[in-house]
């Protein structure tokens, strides 16, 4: 008897931007998974110098969606949601490769507890075998607007195989029930890159769901192939997102304290750090992120975009 017939359908969504070969490497690893009830969506974010059609040519069974313009991480994933038919949606970076048995533990956990709104796998660095990138999150400190990835940079010797509640969610790979997306909303595409998954997790938790980590599932991450590991582009969107996250998820006196911390403590510290390294390009990128938040006070929609049911 084929037990896969009893598996709920999972919609796999990955976003491609100028990295069709990398996306094909991800899809090649996905071919070998033991979970069979999946549909796959590759969203091309209007790659300017790359031909995403090769993805469909090599893997004709996938659904290739073209946005027509670069919608960023949140917007790219949101673009696929109306097409998803699965009970669960797996949002996973195209610069990952997956363990053959990675999906069953994530699905089984969500099947066992309907109060869980997102679950992450254990994530290791692809190019540093056995080194952990993500083993769950500590809770957010809503003064500093920071949290920490548990196990980050440590050698994985089996100590991160636990299943536990997590302080937020890790955007590289996250499984979400479609009913939660319909109830809470899609990701806020105003972020474009970085912190949109934390914003989403905060809204999902506010709706009464839990965010979880399942270390029995493993994904390997090639890390920042699209944006660069140390680029002003990344600096701009990372800090733009961090400040925007604080604006959207703190309230009253807590918001006042968070903003004071960002502008009076974090900003001088970050500026001095880049100055000492003579990284004037990063100083410009950071201050551009600050200015974006100061100048975009109106017109920011704080609700999440709804997925039509």
Image (tube, rainbow, N blue to C red):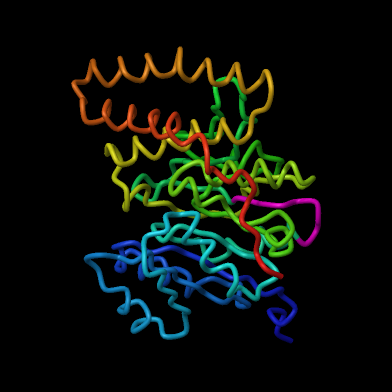
User: What's the magenta region?
Assistant: 111-120
Direction from residue 104 to residue 226 in the image, left or right: left
Residue at 34% from the left image edge and 29% from the top image edge: 286
Q: Quadrant of the N terminus?
A: bottom right
Direction from residue 284 to residue 28 in the image, left or right: right
In the rendering, at what x and y percent does residue 142 appear?
62, 25
Count of numbered labels shown in the rendering = 0
In the rendering, at what x and y percent does residue 79 appear?
51, 66
Q: Nearer the viewer, residue 273 or 156?
A: 273
Residue 113 in view, yes or no: no
In this picture, is 75 found above or below 292? below
In the rendering, at what x and y percent does residue 258 appear?
57, 20
Residue 213 in view, yes or no: yes
Q: Nearer the viewer, residue 157 or 174?
A: 174
Residue at 34% from the left image edge and 84% from the top image edge: 57
In this picture, is 309 found above or below 265? below
In the rendering, at what x and y percent does residue 251 appear?
68, 27
Residue at 66% from the left image edge and 20% from the top image edge: 254
User: Does the segment drawn in magenta span residue 46?
Assistant: no
Q: Nearer the viewer, residue 283 or 216?
A: 283
């Amino acid at each position: 008897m084929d037990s896969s017939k009893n598996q709920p359908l999972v919609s796999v969504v990955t976003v491609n931007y100028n990295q069709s070969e990398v996306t094909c490497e991800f899809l090649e690893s996905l071919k070998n998974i033991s979970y069979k009830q999946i549909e796959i969506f590759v969203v091309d974010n209007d790659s300017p110098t790359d031909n995403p059609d090769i993805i469909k040519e090599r893997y004709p069974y996938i659904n290739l969606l073209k946005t027509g313009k670069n919608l960023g991480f949140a917007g790219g994933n949101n673009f696929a949601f109306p097409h998803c038919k699965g009970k669960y949606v797996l949002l996973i970076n195209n610069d990952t490769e997956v363990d053959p048995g990675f999906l069953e533990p994530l699905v089984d956990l969500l099947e066992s507890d309907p109060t869980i709104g997102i679950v992450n796998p254990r994530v290791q660095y692809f190019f540093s075998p056995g080194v952990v990138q993500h083993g769950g999150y500590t809770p957010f400190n809503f003064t500093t607007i920071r949290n920490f990835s548990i196990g980050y940079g440590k050698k994985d010797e089996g100590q991160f195989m636990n299943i536990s509640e997590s302080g937020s969610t890790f955007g590289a790979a996250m499984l979400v029930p479609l009913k939660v997306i319909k109830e809470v909303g899609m990701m806020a595409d105003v972020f474009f890159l970085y912190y949109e998954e934390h914003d989403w997790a905060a809204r999902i938790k506010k709706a009464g769901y839990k965010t979880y980590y399942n270390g029995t599932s493993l994904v390997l991450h090639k890390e920042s192939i699209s944006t660069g590991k140390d680029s002003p582009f990344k600096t701009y969107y990372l800090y733009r997102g961090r400040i925007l996250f604080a604006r959207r998820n703190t309230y009253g006196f807590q918001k006042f304290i968070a903003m004071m911390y960002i502008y009076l403590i974090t900003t001088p510290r970050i500026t001095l750090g880049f100055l000492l390294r003579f990284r004037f390009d990063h100083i410009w990128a950071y201050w551009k992120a600050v200015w974006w938040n100061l100048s975009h006070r109106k017109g920011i929609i704080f609700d999440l975009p709804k997925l039509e049911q």
